[in-house]
Amino acid sequence: MSYVVQLERGAERELKRLPDRVLRAVDAKLVALSRNPRLRGTVKLRGREAEGWRVRAGEYRILFTIDESKKVVSVYRIRHRGAAYR
């Protein structure tokens, strides 16, 4: 039961700007999300960003939604933890 991980345009741009060290960590998380979008450490968002989930990749956060019916994980933001929720 695997999922397709799709990067929205903004997340794609953010991914391209990441330093190599961070890119490897984020890439590993994206691969893991394709196997199981509710990894250990995944948290349901609350408040303003109520739609979606987040997972940590070092100092960075990957924000995404899950479409169970289509088996799709849509990543809409990849940012440093200090800027991820703005």
Image (cartoon, grey):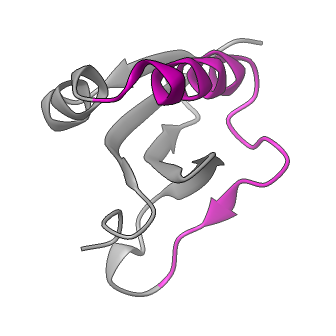
Q: Residue pushed farthest right? A: 40
Q: Nearer the viewer, residue 54 or 16?
A: 16
Q: Residue pushed farthest bottom? A: 47
In the image, residue 69 lies at what x, y percent? 54, 30
Quick one: quadrant of the C terminus? bottom left
Q: Is residue 22 above or below residue 28?
A: below
**Toward which corner of the image does residue 68 lie, by quadrant?**
top right
In the image, residue 31 lies at what x, y percent? 63, 15
The residue positioned 39% from the left and 55% from the top of the image is 80
Q: Is residue 76 left or right of residue 34?
A: left
Q: Nearer the viewer, residue 32 or 38?
A: 32
**Toward which corner of the image does residue 36 lie, by quadrant?**
top right
Mark count: 0
The residue positioned 70% from the left and 12% from the top of the image is 2
The residue positioned 67% from the left and 63% from the top of the image is 43
* Residue 24 painted magenta: yes
In the image, residue 28 lies at what x, y percent? 65, 19
Q: Nearer the viewer, residue 54 or 74?
A: 54
- The stretch in magenta equals 18-46
Q: Is residue 67 above or below residue 72?
A: below
Quick one: quadrant of the N terminus? top right
The residue positioned 45% from the left and 46% from the top of the image is 65
In the image, residue 27 lies at what x, y percent? 54, 18
* Residue 62 painted magenta: no
Q: Is residue 18 left or right of residue 31?
A: left
